[in-house]
Image (cartoon, rainbow, N blue to C red):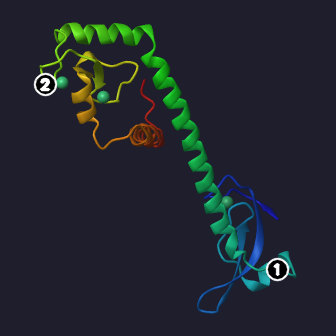
């Protein structure tokens, strides 16, 4: 085993392997023990046998297995976040801050639904979820129940909360940690 750093995972251990390519030619190179990626250039056979006289075969399944596991753990992580955000969102809707914001919107709109102007405001709708918790008042709109359900027609809670999490993940991936 050789200590190095894998470009694909956090792995540092690799093993020299014998790899038979599609065209039948044989290559000797180090394979990451953790994820199965190659961790070195091909090595000459004379050099390879100096390292190990009995070189094990390339583990083809390792890579697929690793990718599958990584995908699974990402899905799990996402599910966890969806739960957290859902909980936080509902907690926020019960907060004093939200109550005051709601009140300000209803006052601004003279308690008239902005969808039909026929009913009083029953719900304060998020035009965007970009600033949940720190909304600008222009991102909120008062609606009656009927108009509100029309706005959200075809959407379900799960799909938009998933959207929120996906956007968060994208933003984090881009490394933009703006507050
Ligand atoms: Zn690796
Ligand atoms: Zn309405
Ligand atoms: Zn809404």
Q: Is mark 2 within 8 Å of ligand 2?
A: yes
**Residue at position x 47%, y 43% in the image:** 173
Image spot of residue 100 (x, y percent): 35, 7
Whether 168 is drawn above or below 41: the answer is above
Q: In the rendered view, tell whether residue 46 sits above or below residue 41.
A: below
Residue at image location 16% in from the left, 14% down from the top: 112
Quickly name the residue at label 2. Answer: 116
List x then y, in percent, for residue 68: 62, 61
Q: Which residue is mark 1?
A: 55
Q: Quadrant of ligand 3?
A: top left
> In the rendering, at what x and y percent does residue 85 appear?
50, 30
Front in this rendered view, residue 75 or 83: 83
Q: Position of residue 32 (x, y in %)?
A: 71, 64
Please report the residue visible at 40 percent of the width from the left and 9 percent of the height from the top.
97
Quarter of the image for the N terminus: give it.
bottom right
Q: Is residue 65 left or right of residue 154?
A: right
Name the residue at 69% across, 68% down: 62
Left or right of 39 on screen, residue 75:
left
Q: Is residue 136 left or right of residue 51?
A: left
Disc 1 is placed on an element classified as loop
* Ligand 1 neighbours mark 1 (CB distance < 8 Å): no
Res 153 → quadrant: top left
Q: Residues within 10 Å of mark 2 (few under 14, many from 20)?
A: few
Q: Is residue 131 above or below residue 18?
A: above
Per the model, the C-alpha gap separating discs 1 and 2 is 76 Å
At mark 2, the secondary structure is loop
């Amino acid at each position: 085993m050789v200590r190095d750093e894998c470009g694909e995972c956090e792995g540092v251990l690799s093993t020299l392997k014998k790899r038979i390519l599609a065209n039948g030619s044989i290559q000797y190179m180090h394979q990451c023990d953790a994820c199965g990626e190659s961790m070195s250039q091909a090595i000459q056979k004379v050099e390879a046998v100096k390292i190990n006289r009995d070189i094990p075969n390339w583990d083809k399944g390792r890579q697929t297995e690793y990718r599958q596991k990584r995908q699974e753990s990402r899905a799990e992580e996402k599910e966890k976040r969806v739960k957290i955000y859902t909980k936080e969102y509902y907690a926020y809707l019960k907060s004093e801050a939200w109550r005051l914001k709601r009140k300000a919107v209803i006052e601004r709109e003279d308690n008239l639904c902005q969808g039909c102007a026929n009913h009083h405001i029953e719900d304060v709708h998020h035009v965007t979820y970009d600033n949940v918790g720190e909304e600008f008042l222009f991102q909120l709109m008062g609606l009656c129940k009927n108009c509100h359900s029309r706005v959200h027609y075809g959407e379900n809670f799960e799909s938009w909360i998933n959207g929120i999490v996906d956007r968060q993940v994208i933003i984090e991936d881009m490394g933009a940690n703006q507050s």
